[in-house]
Image (tube, helix red, strand yellow):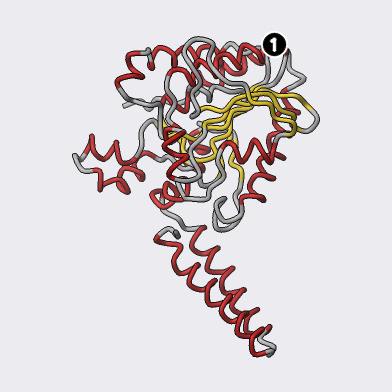
Amino acid sequence: MPLPFEKPIDELAARIQDMRAYAREQEIDLSEEIGLLEARLERLQAEIFENLTRWQRVQVARAPGRPTGLDYIEHVFDDFSELHGDRALGDDSAVVAGLGVLGGRSVVVVAQQKGRDTKENIGRNFGMAHPAGYRKAIRMFNLADKFRLPVVTLIDTPGAYPGVAAEEQGQAWVIAESIQRMCRLKVPAVAVVIGEGGSGGALAIGVANRVLILENAIYSVISPESCAAILWRDAAQAPKAAEALKLTAYDLLELGIVDGVIKEPIGGAHRDPKTTMKCVAERLKAELEGLVGLSEEELVRGRHQRFRNLGYVEPV
C-alpha cells in the first residue's frame, strides 16, 4: 500500500506497465513514449523524495516493505549464527542476536526486529523488547569483549515495551545496564538506525563509537504521536510534533547526534531494499576498518567523549 504522497508515483508507474503490456499485445513499438514516461517518473520521484517533510520521513521510516533487521542480517552478513535467550528468563524475539562475518571479519550482531507482516509483528511485539531482549544484548556484548569481536547493532524500534510485565521485570534498570555495558565495550562498536529509533529502547543498543542513520530513518526521545498527545492533548498533531522534534537524519547530523547519513535509493529503502542493504554493508565495512586499529583505551575514551559532547548550552 503506497504512502499518501507516493500515489502519483504509483499511478504513473502503473500507466507505464499498462503501456508496455499494450505494446506487447498489439506488437507495436512504443519504446519512445515509454521512455518519456520513465524519464518523467524519475523526475517525479526525485522531486517528491527530495522535498519530504519531517512527518513524511516518519512515514517512510515505517513504510511496509522497508528492510528489517533480519533482512540486513541475511544480505549483509555471511555465516550468521543466531544465539537465543538471556540466560535468566527467556528469549525475546524482538531482539535478534548472534555471530556473523562482515567483509571477512567476524562480528557480533544485535538487531531489533519488527515484523514483515501483521502476524510476525505480533510475534515480534512490533520490535518493542522486554527486559529479556536487553539482557540478551548484554550477553552478546560480554561475548564480544571475551572473544575480541567488533559489535554491529541495527536499531529499529518504536521504543522498549512499556507494559506492566516489562516494568515488573525491571525494564528501566536493564536498559540502563545495557547502556552502561556498551559504554565499557573494549571492542569497536558501530550502530545503524535502519528505521525507527525510539527513546531508551533504541539507545540501549546505540552507545557505539560510530552512530549512523539511513536517510529516511528517524531517531528521537519520543514518537511524534506521543509527543503530540503530551503537549497538545491530540495525537493528530503528530506532524507538528515531528517538525519540533527534529528527528530526521539530516537534522541529527547537523546536531551532531549521528556521525553519518547513509543515502537511500530514490523512493526510499522500501522500493529498493537490495541497493539499500548493499550501501549499508559498504559503510559498515569502512567504519569498522577505521576503528579496528584503535586500542581498548582509545575506543572506550572515544565513545565516552562522543556522548559527553552531545548537546550544547546557549547563554541567556
Is 80 on the left or on the right of 92, as rendered? right
**Which residue type carries mark 1?**
Glu
Residue placed most toward the observer, 113 or 46: 113
Which residue: 62% across, 17% down? 302
| Badge 1: residue crowd in 10 Å (few <14, some 14–19, many ≥20) | some
Which residue: 68% across, 26% down? 81
The image position of residue 4, as x and y in percent, is 39, 61
Read off the residue under disc 1. Answer: 296
Is 152 on the left or on the right of 121, as rendered? right
Tally of marks: 1
Q: Spot the residue most to the left.
A: 233
Disc 1 is placed on an element classified as helix
1 is higher (above) or lower (below) than 109: below
Residue placed most toward the observer, 237 or 20: 20
Which residue: 55% across, 52% down? 270
The image position of residue 169, as x and y in percent, is 37, 13
Quarter the C terminus occupies: top left
21 is higher (above) or lower (below) than 152: below
The image position of residue 14, as x and y in percent, is 53, 73
